[in-house]
């Protein structure tokens, strides 16, 4: 444990749609931990890249822009909203076009450097739960508890499809499945910080399990580690 650190660091990694955000929010709330959705951070950068018209090949401009952003997570009711420079961007960053752009943005060296530094600063005192693709392998390889959450592609696509339909977004299920599988391929094969399971992580498959069941299993593991 780092000197001066006041609590555990929990890492939840895994592919898109496995349920990391849902179980992460619930687990952090039960533990009283700070919740950090790193995927939302990359989506936020993607949103700003689109708004500002920055070229993806311009690593310096991407680094400067990403470094300048003030990204925070604020609990509102049962949800945790993502704010950027005081603006609630929670809905905007979940649109399909921003999801696709985030996959490209996350490959850029300048963006990763800026956000990894930001994530480490946000969680430096411990009692923090971070979820994403490279938390247990790159951002916090020293995290005391690491989970790798998975689910079958069809199940992940179904969850994403229902989420978008519920928000009034018209989308085809087959297209959603194709995008999930494309995102998996991009995340696992990118040159910088590819998605992979940390050797000391605990594998949990959420395909046929409720959120409550997954959270309960994680909670028992964390509480045992805290003792």
Image (cartoon, rainbow, N blue to C red):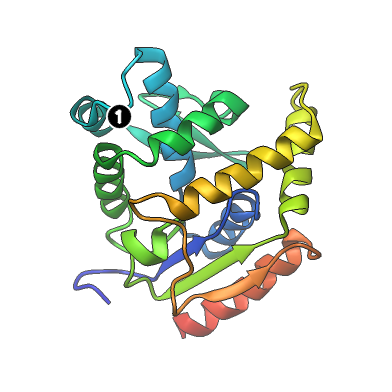
The answer to whether one can see residue 132 in this image is no
Q: Where is residue 215 in the image (x, y as percent from the top left)?
A: 66, 66
Q: Where is residue 92 in the image (x, y as percent from the top left)?
A: 55, 23
Q: For residue 217, what is the image quadrant? A: bottom right
> In the image shown, does 74 or 191 lie closer to the viewer?
191
Q: How crowded is mark 1: few (under 14 residues within 10 Å), some or many (20 or more)?
A: some
> In the image shown, does 126 or 147 lie closer to the viewer?
147
> In the image shown, does 103 or 33 lie closer to the viewer?
103
Q: Which residue is drawn at 37% across and 41% down?
A: 107
Please tell me whether mark 1 sits on a helix, a strand or a loop: loop
- Judged left or right of residue 117, residue 219 is right
Q: Mark 1 points at which residue?
A: 69
The answer to whether one can see residue 120 in this image is yes
Q: Residue at x 69, y 40 (%)?
A: 178
Q: In this view, does 27 lie above or below 17?
A: below
Q: Where is residue 67 in the image (x, y as percent from the top left)?
A: 23, 33
Q: In this view, does 165 lie above or below 111?
A: above
Q: For residue 111, what is the image quadrant? A: top left
């Amino acid at each position: 444990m780092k000197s001066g650190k006041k609590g555990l660091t929990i890492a939840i990694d895994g592919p898109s749609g496995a349920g990391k955000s849902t179980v992460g929010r619930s687990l952090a709330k039960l533990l009283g931990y700070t919740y950090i959705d790193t995927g939302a951070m990359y989506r936020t950068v993607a949103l700003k890249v689109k708004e500002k018209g920055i070229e993806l090949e311009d690593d310096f401009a991407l680094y400067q822009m990403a470094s300048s952003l003030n990204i925070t997570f604020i609990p509102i009711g049962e949800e945790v909203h993502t704010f950027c420079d005081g603006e609630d961007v929670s809905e905007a960053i979940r649109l399909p076009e921003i999801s696709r752009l985030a996959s490209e943005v996350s490959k850029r060296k300048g963006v990763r450097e800026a956000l990894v530094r930001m994530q480490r600063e946000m969680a430096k005192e411990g009692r923090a739960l971070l979820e994403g693709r490279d938390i247990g392998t790159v951002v916090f390889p020293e995290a005391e508890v690491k989970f790798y959450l998975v689910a079958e592609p069809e199940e992940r696509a179904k969850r994403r499809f229902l989420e978008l339909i519920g928000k009034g977004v018209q989308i085809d299920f087959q297209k959603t499945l194709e995008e999930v599988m494309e995102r998996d391929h991009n995340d696992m094969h990118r040159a910088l910080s590819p998605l992979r399971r940390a050797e000391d992580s605990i594998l949990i498959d959420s395909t046929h399990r409720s959120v409550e069941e997954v959270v309960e299993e994680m909670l028992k593991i964390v509480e045992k580690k805290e003792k």
